[in-house]
Image (cartoon, rainbow, N blue to C red):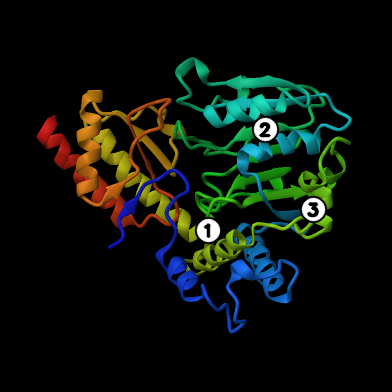
Amino acid sequence: MRIFNFSPGPAVLPEEVLRIAAAEMLDWHGSGMSVMEMSHRGKEFISIADQAQADLRTLLAIPDNYKVLFLQGGAIGENAIVPMNLFHGRTVADYVHTGEWSKKSIKEAKKYGTVNVAASSEDKAFTYIPDRATWQLTKDAAYVHICSNETIGGVEYQWTPDTGDAPLVADMSSHILSRVIDVLKYGVIYGGAQKNIGPAGLTIVIVRDDLLERALPITPSAFHWKEQAASDSMLNTPPTYAIYIAGLVFRWLMAQGGVPAIEEENIAKAKLLYDCLDASKFYASPVRKQDRSRMNVPFKLPDAALDEPFLKGAREHGMVQLKGHRSVGGMRASIYNAMPIAGVETLVAYMKEFERAHG
């Protein structure tokens, strides 16, 4: 029996996708091979990769003047790859600091140029998104970087910032494909796949064509967006099996009605959980209401001594991975696309039961 897995990543995958992958493990479509055994340059795998890219373009309505890259290294790797690809001819990049993942991005970018922290929510323990009017942007910045959903702190942009002539770069690792976005408002979108797309090992990069000419001369070929785009993401061997699973997830998502339909489900799931928190005097939600994440919901119990009993009871009710990140403590429920509403309903029922017993 499968459990409800609230892990922040690697995260729950649709059961239908896992069943298809299991059925095709030894023989993909009569090829006599597992996808894991295929040459990345063979016609079988190229068809898988091409279909995955086409479906992702459909799901996000990606315009023709953007390249889609299937790379490796995760978002942390891309934290370094972004400045390497965008700093040529410019010296300063603007970053908005909204939590732990923004902090990691800033640290990496400082190795390649000057970082201006245009705005920060550190003054209130990263529990809100700084209002756009407070941002202090640099004239002629190479780009403006945001983490549009902070997995640890549970804050999410519910709006797209206007950054003028500077391209907007967004780490969307933990909420890509969970909501409708206008790709045209971004210069670069990137993210690790292991939350809403597939298994760990695959990184998605969506980059506007005109930004492919900005790489620093030191940029390694495997990390050079222009070179990877020219090689259809196959300059080096890509994470083939992760791309295959991502393609199955894209197909599953299309069968659900696409991103608009899954966004409605995500709104309903988040509302169910936040309504429970707001109605309770036992649990506390630290994030400013208008900046609450639909994907990652942190909350705290009135006494940290209750954390372990809460987690133990959750496991007994078939729920795992609810412990909050060590840097903030408490609990965190990650409710990505593949988390069914039944999982959230089970969690809310248990939370109410636990409150009655310990409140």
Tell me the mark number nearer the camera, choosing from 3 and 1. 3
* Left or right, 102 with reference to 303: right
Residue 322 placed where, x, y %?
33, 40
Residue 158 placed where, x, y %?
52, 39
Residue at the image position 52 percent from the left and 18 percent from the top:
122
Q: Residues within 10 Å of mark 2 (few under 14, many from 20)?
A: many
Quadrant, the C terminus: top left
Total marks drawn? 3
Tell me the mark number nearer the camera, choosing from 2 and 3. 3
Kindly identify which numbered label has been placed on residue 133: none
Amino acid beneath label 1: Val
Amino acid beneath label 2: His
Mark 3 vs 1: CB contact within 8 A: no
Residue 113 vs residue 183, the one in the foreground = 113
Q: Residue furthest left?
A: 357
Residue at the image position 34 percent from the left and 45 percent from the top:
271
Residue 160 vs residue 331, the one in the foreground = 331
Identify the residue under disc 1: 259
Quadrant, the N terminus: bottom left
Identify the residue under disc 2: 145
Q: Is residue 154 above or below residue 230?
A: above
Identify the residue under disc 3: 228
| Quarter of the view holding residue 55 | bottom right
| Quarter of the view holding residue 213 | top right
Q: SS class of the residue under badge 2?
A: strand
Q: SS class of the residue under badge 3?
A: helix
Q: Disc 1 versus disc 2: distance between alpha carbons? A: 24 Å
Q: SS class of the residue under badge 1?
A: helix
* Marked residue nearer the N-terminal end (2 or 3): 2
